[in-house]
Amino acid sequence: MDRAPLSFPENFIWGTAVCSHQAEGHNVHSDWWEFEHRGKIRDGSVSGPASDMLNRYPEDFALMEKYGYNGFRLSVEWARIEPEQGRFDEDALRHYESVLKELRKRNIKVCLTLYHWVLPKWVADAGGWTAPGCVRWFKNYVRCVVRRLYPLVDLWCTLNEPTAPLFAGFVMGAFPPEKRSWPLACKVYGNLLRAHVAAHSEITLQARAEGDPRQPLIGIAHAICFVEPRNPHNPVDRKIHEFFDFMHNRAFVESMQTGKIPFPFGIGETIHGLAGSYSFMGVNYYYRMTLRVPAKIPPNDLPDFLFTEGREVTGMGYESYPPGFYQVFKYMSGFGVPMYVTENGCADAEQDDVMRRRYLVRHIAQMHRAMKDGMDIRGYFQWSYIDNFEWLYGFEKKLGLFALEPGTLNRIPRPSATMYGLIARQGVTPEIVREYAPDTEEEIWGA
Ligand code: IFM
């Protein structure tokens, strides 16, 4: 049996990803900071210094270079940049400028997210994404960011996983602002789309102002799982599956394609400038979701949605299902633009992270399969570079290639950090697989 390495194009981006609130630390003017300090996190923690990337980013980028990662997805924090309405903080802007320059110096491509679930406290107090001024405020913030940072960014993610704050914040009541209201959720749906359009237009204007001959790469990081009915022969299961698939996976990105707000989020209203407002699609894929019947909607525990009995689950309680990655690429290819994997990864608290190694190799092999079948995938950002503040789970879930040493916050590489760097340089070779994830060899190359 021929065990040819799974190779990738020369200019493929092999990156890692974080979000500022989760990794930088001390995001004190934000709604999440306030929420955490009200004791809302399951392990009782607060984000505090998080992974201390605010101070240690030069060391982190040196590590990325050393390990062979040539891309980094990060976010800028609205609450730091505009801690009070209309007051743009020069220190914060200077900080992000130095961060991006440091990445450039090391030839690490930058994917920058403008909104990753966290709002300045003043925006949240005014109603967050339901406030009449929210899109205008977001546009002002984005304008300030792009004027300052445009030349240092390769890919722009306007929004990270917009359906998460939408459903967790306004339907399940688990994220700030802890609402359970369908009319508010519908308002948020429309405003997040408008916010995307506003950011898209600011980035495009800046590209022109800079005389950039290229079309800037603009998209969102879209959370998509592979959904299946528990019993495909049961029509009720099939209906529930179709409904969930639409609500979670399809509605938002299809709105970006058609320019319209579909039922049940609206009645087909058109948002000016929305149709086709993307030049790439970001894919955040983690798991397969097999829906229970009847689907149970718990207050704040996503894994309760899932049927996973007897299946391989990650430390998040999600089912690891690499073939779903391929299926998701197939669906996302339909948007006709290049795809980047803006997140994929696995919670595994063990220092030798056998589970993460298997997860990575198996998912990367499915991505390779999709590319071989002609799907246009240009990069992969592993979530996460480092253990960080995992929202409602606090620090209990470990998603990093690098662990944090308790007390010192020193960076401790897990074996997957080395393995991922080897894959970035050489592709998936039989040697790497034999050393790091031997039981996946047969799945990848056959017996
Ligand atoms: O940590 C999160 C991230 O902020 C958004 N996508 C999923 C990750 C892991 O749960």
Image (cartoon, grey):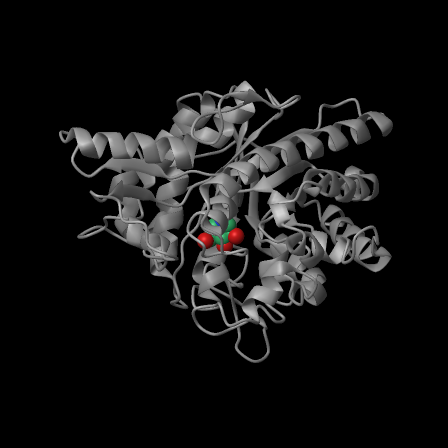
Residue 282 in the image: above or below residue 69: above
Closest to the observer, 101 or 290: 290
Closest to the observer, 110 or 447: 110
Instruction: Return the x and y of residue 198 as percentages of the image width and height.
Output: 70, 32
Write the residue at 38% across / 42% down: 363
Closest to the observer, 101 or 34: 34
Residue 420 visible here: no
Write the residue at 52% across / 48% down: 165
Write the residue at 21% across / 50% down: 311
Location of residue 140 by image quarter: top right
- Quadrant (top left, top right, bottom left, bottom right) of the N terminus: top left
Instruction: Return the x and y of residue 5 as percentages of the image width and height.
Output: 40, 37
Closest to the observer, 252 or 58: 252
Question: Left of 85 or right of it: where is 66?
Answer: left
Question: Left of 310 or right of it: where is 279?
Answer: right
Residue 394 in the image: above or below residue 201: below
User: In the orientation shown, which residue stands out farthest toward the bottom?
Assistant: 407
Question: Left of 46 or right of it: where is 244?
Answer: left
Instruction: Return the x and y of residue 232 as percentages of the image width and height.
Output: 17, 31
